[in-house]
């Protein structure tokens, strides 16, 4: 379970301060699929970054499985991200010098999983997203949709507690986007907690709940 | 920081970055490291080798491995025949040359001098009596003949002149340093030793980068002995050439144990080196190290720039690595390993070029410095030290920029924010 209490985030730009998140309270249960929507600049990606421990909130609390993340050191957060969280970025964020298998295996190796087992798990994850024939391809030799599937494989290979996705279909065509969203649906069916930012209503339909953000505040939460 | 897991992941990242980086960039960086290595080793090696060449020449062509000379308060080596017998009895001795020495004055052009007011053309020299065959076996004296021919044991009234006694070969024009004009093989000159004057013919001229040879006049030992009236066969110097692999210090000690040091100085070639030569070796080594350290700074700056640019252009990917949970230290280690790789490859190529080509080539064809045949002195211990220094410098130069980039905020790196 992820619990957000009175979350605030502001950015300083010289003398002026821009408040992007203005006291957000939110709870996501285990196994839930939540979509976060809002217009551009509403603060949805910033909200995701705070929850996924990629950024430090200005105020408020984020509890993951009742653990106060505010009390974690930088090293603890890094390890927490490695072992408990998964990320799918808008621009895939694959490492260009590694092939698909290596990209997926890397976080597993960092968890001190023996090399052979890490590669086996990486391969399983890539098979799960339908890339069994692209294991040894470098990202530059994959289409956008394939790269995003590698990114998903990397995010799920270590069986994370929560999967965060920041506009995973933003750079993809319709067909690729549908494939990606189908994968999310399958993952969710298998019990994966997913929190996804999207600006496309069509894909928010895949989620159980849709959180609407505007001007740094939650304006409504809809159930699908 | 250096946990086995971090090193493992660092190696994983570094290997892939190097393998898939632009090969020309990799070659260029290794090339820079190779030249830095050569700069580190060769500059100081040549500077030291310049002096070492002179030292080796003195050993090979004058003192040989062990030299016995008269005590400071004696004008010759007493009981020389007995000492010579001791030396000859040693199985480690390959050859020896006993020399008679005395100061003398040389005069040339006396036949063309028109009046007593005209200044005679004289030069002061150390007159050396040798057995030509023995001397050549020990010092290869014959190979330094630049004009005329080498002596034979029957060459009475014939001499070899050192080049510094001949005006045309004298490298300096010093008022206190006189030389003979119009000298060539066949020219007659006068030699005056302790008031005994002889007219002799110049048989040849010797030119070597060893001052002791170039400033002497050589004649057959029996003739000098008769000039100076040395009928007891006591000589002034004995140079001893040892069989390869023999430690000169061992022979020196054997001779001392036989009481030779009671009547003569017994020295190895190293003992006989003047202190200023040893100081010069140290000075040139220091100078070489100072010059090399500039190369080291250049190398470290090069690696710093290369790694910094690499890390800055890969800042987004470093952010992603951190974002997906890769330990910061593992990322830093990957850059340290890349720096290590460049320094290692550069040094490895440098070692191969140094010991397989450069050092043997310079040994075979020494650099022709005015006062020595310079060689390249690169002892393995010194080379290993310099490799270590290069590695350490490049590792630090690689770590600092990596640290600067890795410590930046993860999200800022991913999003490319400043």
Image (spheres, coloured by chain):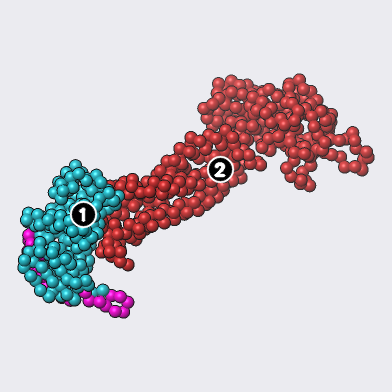
Q: Establish if B120 lies above or below A18.
A: above
- The picture quadrant where one finds residue A123 is top left
Q: Establish if B200 lies above or below B280.
A: above
Q: Name the subunit of mark 2.
A: B
Chain depicted in cyan: A
Q: Which residue is mark 2?
A: B46
x 46%, y 48%: residue: B32
Question: Which residue is at the far front?
Answer: A174
Frontmost residue, B79 versus B45: B45
How far from the left and from the top, in percent, is residue B315?
32, 59
Q: Which residue is mark 1?
A: A145
Q: As drawn, is A74 to the left or to the right of B96?
A: left
The color chain B is rendered in: red
| Camera-side mark, 1 or 2 | 1
Frontmost residue, B281 versus A94: A94
Q: Quadrant of the N terminus of chain A?
A: bottom left
x 51%, y 36%: residue: B357
Characterize the local packing of mark 1: few (<14), some (14-19) or many (20 or more) Cα atoms within 10 angstroms.
Answer: many
On whether residue A22 falls in the magenta region, the answer is yes
Q: As drawn, is A43 to the left or to the right of B221?
A: left
Q: As drawn, is B2 to the left or to the right of B189?
A: left
Q: Quadrant of the C terminus of chain A?
A: bottom left
Q: As drawn, is A26 to the left or to the right of B407?
A: left
- The picture quadrant where one finds residue B417 is bottom left
Looking at the rendering, the stretch of residues picked out in magenta corresponds to A12-34
x 10%, y 64%: residue: A205
């Amino acid at each position: 379970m992820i619990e957000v209490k009175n979350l605030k985030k502001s950015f300083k730009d010289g003398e002026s301060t821009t408040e992007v998140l203005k006291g957000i309270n939110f709870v996501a249960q285990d196994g839930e699929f939540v979509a976060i929507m809002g217009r551009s600049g509403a603060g949805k990606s910033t909200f995701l970054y705070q929850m996924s421990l990629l950024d430090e909130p200005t105020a408020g609390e984020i509890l993951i499985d009742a653990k106060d993340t505010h009390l974690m050191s930088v090293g603890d957060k890094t390890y927490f991200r490695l072992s408990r969280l998964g990320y799918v970025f808008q621009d895939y964020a694959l490492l260009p010098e590694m092939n698909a298998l290596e990209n997926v295996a890397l976080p597993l190796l960092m968890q001190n999983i023996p090399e052979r087992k890490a590669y086996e798990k990486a391969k399983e994850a890539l098979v799960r997203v339908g890339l069994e024939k692209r294991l040894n391809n470098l990202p530059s030799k994959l289409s956008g949709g394939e790269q995003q599937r590698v990114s998903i494989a990397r995010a799920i290979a270590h069986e994370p507690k929560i999967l965060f996705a920041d506009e995973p279909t933003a750079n993809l065509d319709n067909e690729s986007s549908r494939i990606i969203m189908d994968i999310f649906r399958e993952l969710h069916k298998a019990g994966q907690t997913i929190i996804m930012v999207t600006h496309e209503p069509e894909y928010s339909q895949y989620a159980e709940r849709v959180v609407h953000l505007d001007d740094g505040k939650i304006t409504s939460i809809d159930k699908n | 920081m250096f946990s086995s897991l971090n090193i493992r992941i660092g190696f994983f990242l570094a290997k892939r970055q190097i393998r898939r980086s632009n090969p020309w960039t990799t070659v260029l960086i290794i090339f820079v490291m190779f030249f830095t290595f050569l700069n580190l080793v060769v500059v100081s090696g040549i500077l030291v080798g310049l002096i070492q060449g002179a030292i080796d020449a003195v050993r090979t062509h004058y003192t040989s491995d062990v030299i016995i000379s008269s005590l400071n308060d004696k004008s010759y080596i007493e009981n020389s025949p007995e000492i010579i017998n001791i030396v000859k009895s040693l199985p480690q001795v390959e050859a020896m040359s006993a020399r008679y020495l005395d100061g003398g004055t040389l005069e040339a052009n006396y036949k063309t001098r028109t009046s007593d007011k005209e200044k005679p053309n004289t030069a002061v020299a150390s007159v050396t009596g040798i057995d030509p065959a023995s001397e050549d076996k020990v010092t290869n004296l014959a190979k330094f003949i630049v004009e005329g021919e080498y002596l034979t044991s029957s060459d009475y009234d014939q001499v070899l002149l050192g080049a510094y006694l001949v005006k045309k070969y004298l490298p300096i024009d010093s008022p206190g340093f006189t030389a003979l004009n119009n000298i060539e093989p066949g020219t007659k000159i006068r030699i005056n030793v302790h008031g005994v004057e002889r007219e002799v013919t110049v048989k040849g001229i010797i030119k070597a980068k060893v001052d002791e040879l170039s400033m002497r006049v050589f004649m057959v030992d029996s003739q000098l002995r008769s000039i100076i009236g040395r009928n007891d066969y006591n000589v002034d110097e004995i140079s001893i050439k040892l069989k390869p692999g023999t430690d000169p210090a061992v022979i020196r000690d054997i001779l001392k144990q036989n009481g030779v040091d009671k009547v003569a100085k017994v020295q190895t070639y190293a003992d006989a080196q003047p202190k200023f030569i040893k100081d010069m070796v140290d000075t040139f080594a220091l100078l070489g190290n100072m010059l090399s350290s500039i190369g080291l700074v250049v190398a470290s700056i090069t690696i710093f720039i290369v790694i910094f640019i690499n890390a800055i252009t890969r800042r987004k990917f470093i952010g992603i690595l951190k974002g997906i949970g890769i330990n910061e230290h593992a990322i830093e280690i990957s850059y340290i390993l890349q720096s290590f790789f460049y320094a290692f490859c550069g040094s490895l190529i440098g070692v191969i070029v140094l010991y397989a080509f450069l050092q043997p080539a310079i040994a075979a064809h020494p650099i022709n410095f005015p006062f020595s045949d310079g060689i390249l002195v690169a002892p393995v211990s010194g080379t290993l030290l310099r490799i270590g220094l290069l590695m350490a410098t490049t590792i630090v130069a690689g770590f600092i920029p990596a640290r600067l980039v890795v410590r930046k905020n993860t999200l800022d790196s991913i999003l490319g924010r400043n």
